[in-house]
Amino acid sequence: GAFFMGVGMLLASVITSVWQYYLAYGILVAIGSGAIYVPVAGAVSKFFTEKRNFALGITISGSGLGQYFILPFMQQVVESKGWQVAFLYTAFLMLIFGVGIPLILLKGRGLPEDAGIDVRKVGKEKETVVLSQEQGKRSAPRSMEDYTLRQAVATAPFWAYFGMYFMVCFVFDGVIFVHAIPYLTDVGFTGHSAAKALGYVGLIATVTMALFSPLGDRFNKRLLLTVLLGLHALLLLWLIHIRSEPMLWSFVLLYGILMGAVWPLTVSVLTEIFGSASISGILGACTLAFGLSGLVAPWAAGYVFDLYKSYNPVFYFTAVMSLASSVCAYYSRKTRAMM
């Protein structure tokens, strides 16, 4: 994924026509971007079992930190040296860090057993036994709870999770991050204040992913996710009534905390249901919900606004969706047959 993004950015730095931009950025960079998240989340889920949610929280928070620090830097590069140089710098960053670091750290070995590590439970503790290179080449036996993608798709919990993931992405990414700024400017805030507020939501979520994710290792992940998505519905109803700066920044703080707490749980819950053996394939199938929501949500919200000349119906609908996602999260659990 990082290789495709790096090559796409590199080609984008020397484009001379629009079709070249579509090819370099719209196809190559898009392919790379879509290929990065799932393998990273899957690899972390395989390596970490006892504190998986904490590990995922730290991992996913990296994306927010990148946006917070790198995007302003690249904007300065665009203003001082031009967009071609900015694309070139981004390409080098992706190829050096995105491709180089995984190769150096993992040396092409993406699974615990491939790296010569066997994690066994002894009572309530865990001990890590480093196997010999010959033993490490042999795959460790999988748990009976590990599902293949085909087996997972045939279960009701998979589709409950798929529905939950679709609705969460619909609201978070398709509506809030696309329409929050025009909504806030419509109700009286300046464009600068609205953009700043949205930026701080991402920063707070990033910090929360690292700080609050241990809660997911201490409590029932599925029930915690269910409660958080229910609270999300209340925050969306509150958004409709925001008219002052204190209300706005209170919302930003709470929404950022909630978003940061939710994202690591969405991966760790899936791993708890189906095991880690095929988690990348199962998570990849579920990310189809992200693509579908991204295709539908921004257009649907804009259409409703054009129809009613108000964002209120949009946020009422997303609040209902958030409640529905909470119900789906509750039923994203192992059935008796799966146990």
Image (tube, rainbow, N blue to C red):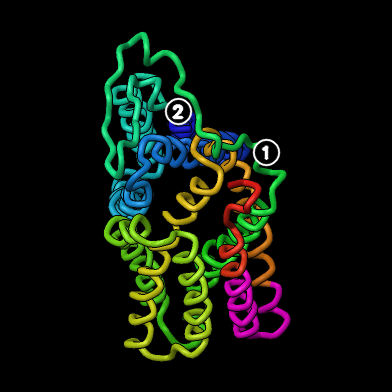
Q: Residue furthest front?
A: 123
Q: Which mark is residue 3?
A: 2
**How many neighbours does mark 1 have within 10 angstroms: few (below 14), some (14-19), or many (20 or more)?**
few
Asked if the residues shown at circle 1 and circle 2 are in contact, with their CB atoms under 8 angstroms apart, the answer is no
Q: Amino acid at mark 1?
A: Gln
Residue at 37% of width from left, 32% of height from top? 98
The structure residue drawn at horizontal position 48% and vertical position 32%, both measured from the top left corner, is: 1
Closest to the observer, 29 or 61: 61
Magenta segment: does it hold 70? no
**What residue would you read off at disc 1?**
151
**Which secondary structure, mark 1?**
helix
Residue located at (37% from left, 16% from top): 136
Query: Residue type at mark 2?
Result: Phe
Q: Earlier in the sequence, mark 1 or mark 2?
A: 2
Residue 15 in view, yes or no: no
Residue 17 image offset from top left, x and y in percent: 58, 37
Q: Position of residue 193 (x, y in %)?
A: 36, 77
Q: Which residues are magenta?
A: 303-324
